[in-house]
Image (spheres, coloured by chain):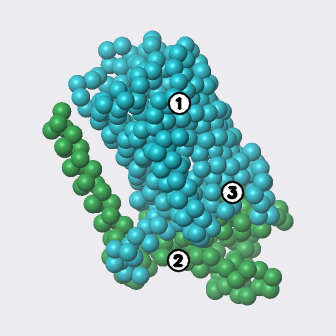
């Protein structure tokens, strides 16, 4: 096991053992999606710390394990901002840090509607070894991941990603559709992609008892995502697509676990992706920071 | 391209600074009067509920477990802002106020569903409809006035003043 990999795991262990000491108060019911987004934003003043992991198979090459940490903060009830750190480990190759992302989601309408739009703007500063597959875009295909880390990491990518999220909730079901447009800030064309999702809690009524395994604490669903080519070659030609059942477990202690096995839908896609994640919400994080910065109590 | 990247980095820094100042400002600049005005404007949202929403009856009003389930939901999702005993906190107004307790169940349900996004209350339509009605049942069971001691209940959930009728 490489030193970087060991350090990453130690870091994750440290962050989550620190979180154990924060007061246990559950907050939001988290969305089960890993790629798609619904229209629900982080509660204002709360910070959610998340760790995600993706194991992917690779034909004609080495399987990989990509991982990322997300720090999601509810700046207001209509604006959520999120910072990502990502890395990956390719078996029989090496472990590398692959970059950071800064994402913002803004809810333009003040009330709930049948379809609720959210605007998404993200800046990505990553290298060519990035394998987190957080979105399907352009003509990204499985063969792109064959490049050895030592070579791939030399490519620096600065990218802007825009999404229009359209999400509805009806009779306990959530349906969401995300349209993506991404632009590498070097001289590359706009690339496009999509993500779709549907999910529902296993029970709609809450139990009168406080319980960990009650069905209302579980949300199940499915998501599908992939690329739609670029400005010059728009469409499904030379694109990859995935379908993935998703399940999340919102524990009353404030922890959330997610798991999602993903399956490639064509020969350009990885055959299998196994994703899982763990997250914890820190309530009143904004107040804590405010006190540190000298705000009035 | 380098110029574009430099501009982006500058933008990142500027928005970061504005975020930090918004965190600080959220707490720093509010006088008690401003907070009071904000609270009353949050109560005003109840009056904005359309008639169709206002006249909706609570389908769980006869459900004996609805208040207990609503109490659990309140503890998980609402107490953080509205206070452990719904007495109001720094971020959310008291739910024991007459404005809330005298409001129709349908109006409270409407505010829960739509939030008061511009004033800091998120939408709660992510909770399925029956859970929102369970929350309404719990809120209406609190009654007007300060929390009284109830034997057998944790201090943070001591509830009813004068119970108001479920609508």
Name the chain under label 2.
B
| Residue displayed at 52% across by 59% down | A15
For residue A120, say whether it is visible: no
Neighbourhood count class around disc 1 (C-alpha, 10 Å): few under 14, some 14–19, many 20 upward: few
Up-down: is B143 above or below A87?
A: below
**Spatial distance from mark 1 to mark 3, Cα to Cα?**
33 Å
Q: Quadrant of the C terminus of chain A?
A: bottom left
Task: Tell me the shade of chain B.
Answer: green
Neighbourhood count class around disc 3 (C-alpha, 10 Å): few under 14, some 14–19, many 20 upward: some
> In cyan, which chain?
A
| Residue displayed at 31% across by 31% down | A154
Which one is closest to the eye, mark 2 or mark 3?
A: 3
Q: Total of numbered circles in the picture? A: 3
Image coords of residue A25 (percent x, y): 62, 67
| Residue displayed at 42% across by 50% down | A82
Tag 2 residue: B89
Up-down: is A1 above or below A149?
A: below
Tag 1 residue: A91
Image coords of residue A138 (percent x, y): 40, 22
Image coords of residue A207 (percent x, y): 79, 59
| Residue displayed at 45% across by 40% down | A87
Residue extending farthest to the left is: B3
Tag 3 residue: A251
Q: Nearer the viewer, residue B34 or A96?
A: A96
For residue B22, say whether it is visible: yes
Question: Do residues under tags 1 and 3 come within 8 Å of each other at their CB atoms?
Answer: no
Which one is closest to the eye, mark 1 or mark 2?
A: 1
Which one is closest to the eye, mark 1 or mark 3?
A: 1
**Spatial distance from mark 1 to mark 2, Cα to Cα?**
51 Å
């Amino acid at each position: 096991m490489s030193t970087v990999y060991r350090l990453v795991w130690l870091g994750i262990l440290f962050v989550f053992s620190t979180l154990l000491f924060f007061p246990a108060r559950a907050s939001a019911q988290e969305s089960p999606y890993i790629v798609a987004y619904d229209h629900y934003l982080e509660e204002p003043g709360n910070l959610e710390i998340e760790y995600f992991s993706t194991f992917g198979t690779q034909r004609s090459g080495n399987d990989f394990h990509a991982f990322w940490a997300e720090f999601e903060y509810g700046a207001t009830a209509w604006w959520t901002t999120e910072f990502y750190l990502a890395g990956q480990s390719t078996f029989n190759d090496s472990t590398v840090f692959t970059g950071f992302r800064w994402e913002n989601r803004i809810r333009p309408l003040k009330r709930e509607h049948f379809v609720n739009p959210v605007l998404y703007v993200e800046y990505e500063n990553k290298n060519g070894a990035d394998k987190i597959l957080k979105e399907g875009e352009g003509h990204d295909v499985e063969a792109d991941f064959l490049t050895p880390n030592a070579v791939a990491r030399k490519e620096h990518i600065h990218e802007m990603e825009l999404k229009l999220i359209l999400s509805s909730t009806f009779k306990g079901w959530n349906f969401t559709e995300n349209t993506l447009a991404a632009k590498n800030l070097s001289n590359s064309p706009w690339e496009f992609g999509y993500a779709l999702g549907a999910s529902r809690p296993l029970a709609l009524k809450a139990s009168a008892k406080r319980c960990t395994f009650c069905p209302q604490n579980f949300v199940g669903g499915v998501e599908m995502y992939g690329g739609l080519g670029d400005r010059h070659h728009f469409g499904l030609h030379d694109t990859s697509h995935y379908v993935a059942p998703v399940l999340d477990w919102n524990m009353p202690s404030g922890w959330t676990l997610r798991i999602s096995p993903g399956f490639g839908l064509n020969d350009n896609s990885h055959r299998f992706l196994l994703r899982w994640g763990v997250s914890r919400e820190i309530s009143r994080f904004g107040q804590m920071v405010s006190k540190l910065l000298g705000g009035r109590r | 391209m380098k110029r574009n990247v430099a501009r982006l980095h500058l933008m990142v820094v500027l928005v970061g600074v504005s975020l930090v100042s918004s965190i600080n400002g959220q707490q720093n600049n509010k006088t008690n009067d401003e907070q009071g005005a904000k609270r009353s404007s949050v109560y005003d949202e109840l009056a904005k509920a359309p008639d169709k929403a206002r006249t909706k009856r609570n389908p769980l009003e006869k459900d004996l477990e609805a208040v207990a389930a609503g109490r659990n939901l309140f503890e998980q999702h609402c107490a953080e802002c509205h206070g452990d005993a719904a007495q109001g906190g720094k971020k959310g107004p008291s739910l024991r106020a007459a404005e809330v307790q005298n409001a129709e169940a349908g109006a409270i349900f409407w505010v829960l569903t739509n939030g008061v996004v511009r004033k800091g209350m998120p939408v709660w339509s992510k909770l399925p409809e029956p859970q929102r009605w369970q929350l309404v049942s719990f809120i209406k069971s609190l009654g007007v006035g300060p929390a009284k001691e109830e034997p057998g209940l944790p201090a943070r959930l001591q509830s009813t003043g004068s119970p108001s009728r479920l609508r």
